[in-house]
Amino acid sequence: MFLKTIDDKAKFKFKILSRIYWKLWFGRERIALKSIMEAEMTKKAIGAGSYLYPMPTVLIGTLVHGKPNFITIAYCGIVNHEPPVFTFGSDKNHYSNLGIKQNGCFSVNLPSVKLLAQTDFCGTVSGRETDKSRLFKIFYGKLERAPMIDECPLTMECKLIKVDETIGSHEIFLGEIVETYVENECLNNGIPDIAKLDPVLFSMYDWRYWKVGDNVGHVGHESKKVK
């Protein structure tokens, strides 16, 4: 009986020591593996942010209390094909938001690089204090209440579908595109030519504007190079 007790104690001690050994061993292995991965990794975590580069830059047009107003927006894009739907985010304090809700429509105006100064101006002053409509020649289309900029090579008028006010700092507007207007000289085989449109692009955290570079490929053709 006494010998059995000693034997049991020895087994128990062996088990404890074995567990400690393996924990230490695998711990070292994990640390070593982590060090190797960190040494090989070339990317750095920089936190959550609006890092989708580049961003298109547009001028959103609306009537506020019956007067045309335009605001520069980069948080935007196409989110549906049929029907075509455009969406953008606008800070809840922006003056234009009220007009869009009042009229149930808005315009999307794609400025060219030639309109960079006016585009920047519309994004740095508020329509509450400044008449931004004086900067442009304005026309209207099917919706009659969505002011568009004649100097922009491409404009679209949108019927408001929905406003989401629940996400955070911005209100999210969705609008169905009911018509598009393009300068004849910016069309190629009946569709807009991005090089001729010469749109303004934006990078968020260095607050810079950019322009489009070269065409690098064609959809469906480049995939053939993949083996």
Image (tube, helix red, strand yellow):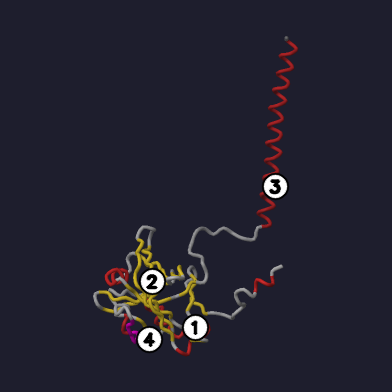
Q: Pick whichever of labels 2 and 4 is earlier in the sequence.
A: 4
Q: CA distance from mark 1 to mark 3?
A: 56 Å
Disc 3 is placed on an element classified as helix
* Residue 61, image quadrant: bottom left
Judged by depth in the image, the label closer to the viewer, 2 or 3, is 2
Q: How many marks?
A: 4
Q: Which mark is residue 104?
A: none
Q: Secondary structure at mark 2?
A: strand
Looking at the picture, which amino acid does disc 2 mark? Glu
- Mark 1 neighbour class, 10 Å CA radius: few under 14, some 14 to 19, many 20 or more: few
Indicate which disc, 1 or 4, sits on the residue closer to the N terminus: 4
- Secondary structure state at the residue bearing disc 4: loop
Which x, y percent locates residue 138? 33, 85
Q: Amino acid at mark 1?
A: Ile
Identify the residue shown where x is 67% and y is 44%: 30
Sequence-wise, which precedes: disc 2 or disc 1?
2
Q: Horizontal placement of 43 versus 47: left or right?
A: right
Label 3 packing within 10 angstroms: few (<14), some (14-19), many (20+) = few
Which disc is residue 176 wearing? Answer: 2
Q: Which residue is mark 4?
A: 150
Viewport quadrant of the C terminus: bottom right
Separation of marks 1 and 4 at Cα, in angstroms? 18 Å
Q: Residue at x 65, y 74 (%)?
A: 222
Magenta residues (range): 135-141
Q: Quadrant of residue 43?
A: bottom right
Amino acid type indicated by mark 4: Asp
Quarter in which the N terminus is drawn: top right
Write down the residue under mark 3.
Answer: 32
- In the rendered structure, find residue 191 and report the number of the disc placed on it: 1
